[in-house]
Image (tube, rainbow, N blue to C red):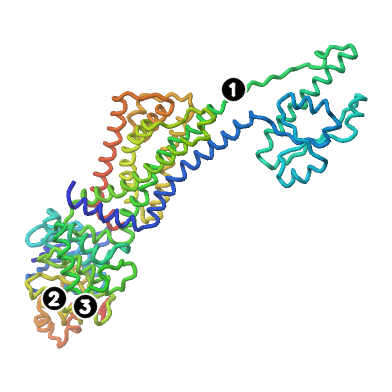
Amino acid sequence: MLEAQKLQKRFGKTVAVEDVSFTARDGCVTALLGPNGAGKTTSLRMLYGLLQPDAGQAMVDGAVAAAEPLAAQRRLGVLPDAPGLYGRLTAREHLRYTARLQGLSAQEAETRAAALIERLDMGGIADRRSAGFSQGERRKIALGRALIHDPQNVVLDEPTNGLDVPSTRDLRKYVRSLAEAGKCVLFSTHILQEVSAVCDRVVIIARGRVVAEGTPGELLARTGQSNLEDAFVQLIGTEEGLGA
Amino acid sequence: MTSKALAVFAKEALDAARDRRSVLSALSFALFGPLVLAMALATIAKKSDDNGPLQLTVAGAEHAPSLVRYLEQNGAEIVRASAGVEPAVRRGDLELALVIPKDFGSDFRASRPARVELVHDASRMGSSTPVRRVERLLERYNVQVAGLRLTARGISPQVALPVRLSEIDLSTAASRAAFALATFPIFLLMSAFVGGMSVAIDTTAGERERGSLETLLVHAVPRTDLVVGKWMAAVAFNLLAVLLTLLFSFLVLRWDRLQRMDIPVALSVEDALRLLALLLPLALLAPAVQMLIALFARSFKEAQTQLSLLMLLPMIPGLLLSFQSFEPRPWMRAVPILAEQVVMRDLLYGKVSAPSALALTVGATLTLTVLCLLVTSRLLRHERIVLGR
């Protein structure tokens, strides 16, 4: 379970996150939906311990990220907005390295890497250096790295950004299967279709604040709109920064 | 040493070994230093050959038999040639040639200044020493003949010699070689800074520039493990460079041409090992400092520029120390980098430092290394450093 409690973060005079609270439950895909620049990435970075909140706290299965970052990070798999790959390493080497970083033994690392290569259908690129990989291939490696230690909680920052249609569909399917296996998945996006396609719950964030939280059905009922797009526009009060 | 730090080391070492830039920068410098040393020593070796016989081609020797005999008696090996030596000098086949014109004999006998021509090409570096030797011989011949002519006319030759200059050059091949050798510790020292520099930058500033630092930091890895692992990879490259530099220098100094010129520079195996022991702490320190500084740079390029400039800093005391008269102060033995140079200099002049002084030097260097690693680990918790803002 992932919890954000009254998170606040400013960079100099800019307030990136003003007041963000939400809960992402196990067995559920929770979307963090908001226009570009709403504070999604900053909120997630506080959750995975890269940034320290100015106020409030972020928790992973009860471990406060700012206070015990290692305990929180062990229970968390993260796909950051940039895949951050090493061009001179192969896909398998990336997975192996990540496994060792998460504390798996050399043998476990090998087995897990092989399993994920199979599961994410990376057999063709497993032993090639990543320098020339396509966006989709990179994203697969990054996802494999996030899941290498079989974490209970998974955070995905705009995971379908820059992916083509087949890759996007594969990824959504995979995200659903994680939730069905009882994992807690938190998924940031600015794309509305994504929400209806994979998410159980939606947290809408705009200008650094959570403006609504609930299932897509609840949000429709609350705004009296018939489709999610209109509901969303009404909730955030503008059409700015929205992807189709 | 934790298994996570080892995993970081293994990854960074593999990554760097596949990076041509890192490998080349470690290897090229290891060759560069000893090469410069070899060239400097070769120049000195050539200079010491100048005390050997002077080869002089003379055209028209038959016009001045007494002059030629004088030259032969004073150490010149005369090669007789027909006229037309100028083209040979121009082509570079001959270094220099003395041309004695037909009318030398009649002028000489009539006590008129008799002309001889010394043909050489001043744009050729190598010819200046033999030219000077021939000129000096001719001057002496002049004085001698002038003296005889004055005596024949009842005048003491002393009258015509207001000043007599005698030059005494005390420099020997050995002392000139010692000067070249004084720069040798600087090259050794630099090898400990250059070898791992590319790796140190690539794993810090480079990692952030490529956007992989954030991904790295979301893993449950203590920052110290990350820093130590990366540092070890840079150290490995450093050690490679230091070892190769020492090995090549060792070979240069054992070169048989140097042995023949009785220059007392042959590096013994024990001395080479002592130098290595001294360079080891430096090879540990350099990447620690470089990583710390590179973390503040905005990009790989910026870090590289800053660190290259910074590398010149420790070389300044090294240059000072290369003057024999400079006496190191006791406090210098506690300043990392400077202290190593003091000890290295002592070693090359045949002094072995006291164990307590060595312990102080090594201790100071290792302390600074640990300090740098700790500060770097702490910096990786700072948002500004991690996100590069």
- Residue B318 is situated, as x and y percent measured from the top left of the image, at 44, 34
Do the dots labelled 3 and 1 sit on one chain? no
Q: Which residue is mark 1?
A: B170
Dot 3 or dot 2, earlier in sequence? 2
Give the amino acid at mark 1: Leu
Relative placement, left or right, of B126 versus B104 is: left
Q: Nearer the viewer, residue B387 or B222?
A: B222
In whole angstroms, how far apart are the C-alphas of marks 3 and 1?
93 Å
Kindly identify which numbered label has been placed on residue A202. 2
Chain label for disc 3? A
Badge 1: few (under 14), some or many (20 or more) residues near its Cα, within 10 Å?
few
Eye-nearest disc, 3 or 1:
1
Q: Which residue is mark 3?
A: A237
Do the dots labelled 3 and 2 sit on one chain? yes
- Residue B189 is situated, as x and y percent measured from the top left of the image, at 40, 38
Residue at the image position 90 percent from the left and 27 percent from the top: B112
Badge 3: few (under 14), some or many (20 or more) residues near its Cα, within 10 Å?
few
| Residue B138 position (above or below residue A162) | above
Occupied quadrant, residue B286: top left
Could you tell me which secondary element the residue under label 3 belongs to?
loop
Chain label for disc 1? B
Give the amino acid at mark 3: Gly
Q: Nearer the viewer, residue B373 or A242?
A: B373
